[in-house]
Image (tube, rainbow, N blue to C red):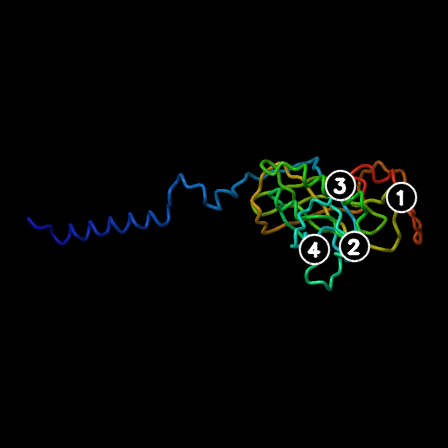
Amino acid sequence: MSPTRRALLSSAALGAVGALAGCFGGDPADDSDPVARSSSAPGTDTDPTVLKVRNDWREPVLVEAGSGGEDGTDGGVAPDDDASGDDADGPTGVGRELVTTAGRAARIRAAPGVADEDRRRVRAFLDETDYDAETVYVTPAGVRSCQRLEIHSVSWQPGRVEYEYCRELRPPDAACEAGTRVTLALLFRLPVALDERIRGSGSSGRSPCRTTDTEYAVIEENATVPGNATATDEWGDF
């Protein structure tokens, strides 16, 4: 007995639904879905590990190593003759990003103009990160030469990172020049493996800090402080 028209239509409809399910649902065991990889739970670190590095105003603090064999194995020191902004083959400034692999970290270094000791700190900070369980969030900032940022917390969710800070004067023995600004790069070590895509970021803060351990409040308006090597021994004092 031949099948009825209704039975044929029903069979065809079921086949179409099955095909669509295969297209939209996929294999639940397939872990190649980028959404699944970026579904880290939101979190906050109220005592974040953060490195703060300075350079001259409007100059980059971090750059990406160029081609031609540069692999970041120079101790983090980029030669000054690599810094020409007019050289198309020179290093490219690194802006806001999530560093998620050791390979990417190896191509980031401190820019010319950054003190050698700070360049080495950048290299050590990036190299000592466990990218299987951690992520480095890099973001630029600007600050007056005689001020510094105190970081209170950093928060993250898929595709977005935010931090809270306050602004205070640097120690009197830290090198600075009143009335000038510097470029600042913040490198946060986040205790979570995030997806490399970042779709948003933010920061909030106040100036001056409500509470501080400093015992000074004013640096003379035209002061230039020569600085002291001991003032940069701790990573948080930049």
Mark 1 residue crowding within 10 angstroms, few (<14) / some (14–19) / many (20+)? few
Q: Nearer the viewer, residue 32 or 17?
A: 32
Local secondary structure at mark 1 = loop
Q: Which of marks 1 and 2 is nearer the N terminus?
A: 2
Find disc 2 in the rendering and name its residue.
Answer: 80
Q: Earlier in the sequence, mark 3 or mark 2?
A: 2
Q: Earlier in the sequence, mark 3 or mark 1?
A: 3
Find disc 4 in the rendering and name its residue.
Answer: 93
Is the residue under label 1 in contact with that under label 3 (CB below 8 Å)? no
Local secondary structure at mark 2 = helix
The amino acid on which the numbered mark 3 sits, given as a three-letter code, is: Arg
The amino acid on which the numbered mark 4 sits, given as a three-letter code, is: Gly
Q: Which of 103 and 229 is in front in this view?
A: 103
In the rendered structure, find residue 217 and report the number of the disc placed on it. 1
On the image, which quarter does residue 81 sit in? bottom right
Q: Position of 59 compared to 107: left or right?
A: right
